[in-house]
Amino acid sequence: MMQNIAAPIVKRNWWIMALRGLFAVIFGLIALVAPRIALLAFIYVFAAYALVDGGIAVITSIQERELLDRWGWVLFEGILSILAGLIAFANPALTALVLLYIIAAWAIVSGISEIVAAIRLRKIIEREWLLVLAGVVSVLFGLALILQPAATALVLVWWVGGFAVVFGILLVSLAFRVRSWRGLTRAAV
């Protein structure tokens, strides 16, 4: 039943899928050709989001303080969000560096967790060395981010750009394939 409903909707809106893919390709190419601009754009989008999100949280906390049990926390979160947005606009390089260190810390902690899990599971699963290897790669990735932040930030943007180009091409291809579906009958619509 759901397939009978979804297929005509997808076919009718194939152009949205194609447009989405085209924008992904454009974004990916910008990230590959001008990674610093792409990183800066990402930071500015984050800054704008943080300001708007923080503003909404502050307004909501003040207006709804009688109904919200923890309105003070919502207000605090809103103020922090606004501060983060202002800092990101004022100093995008610092914002990129902090984000990079957060990713590095996450990679190192998750890598160590994977190694510990593999050691604990070695009597239960086979080929636990794959989990150890994944953990080691994660730790090395985190260390690379810490030791060479500028270079690894550019590499991350390139990876995102490459992904966006491939994803976009696949999405555009799928959109044109959907457009030419012949299997749909009027009865399915």
Image: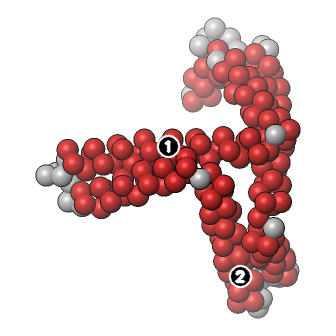
Q: Is the residue 31 above or below the residue 93 in the image? A: above
Q: For this view, does 48 lie left or right of residue 38?
A: left
Residue ID for mark 2:
112
Residue placed at 79% from the left, 44% from the top?
Answer: 35
Q: Amino acid at mark 2?
A: Ile
Secondary element at tag 2: helix
Q: For this view, does 117 lie left or right of residue 70?
A: right
Q: Report the colour scheme.
A: secondary structure
Q: Is the residue 43 above or below the residue 184 in the image? A: below
Based on the displayed image, in which of its 4 quarters is residue 105 positioned? bottom right
Residue placed at 61% from the left, 56% from the top?
Answer: 95
For the residues labelled 2 and 1, the Cα–Cα distance comes to 33 Å
N-terminal of the pair, mark 2 or mark 1, is: 1
Dot 1, how many residues are within 10 Å of its Cα: few (below 14), some (14-19), or many (20+)?
some
Based on the displayed image, in which of its 4 quarters is residue 20 positioned? top right
Q: Where residue 73 sits in the image (x, y, percent)?
A: 30, 61
Classify the position of the C terminus by image quarter: top right
Q: Where residue 122 sits in the image (x, y, percent)?
A: 77, 88
Which mark is drawn over residue 49?
A: 1
Residue placed at 83% from the left, 26% from the top?
Answer: 173
Q: Amino acid at mark 1?
A: Tyr
Would you say residue 174 is visible in this rendering? no
Secondary element at tag 1: helix
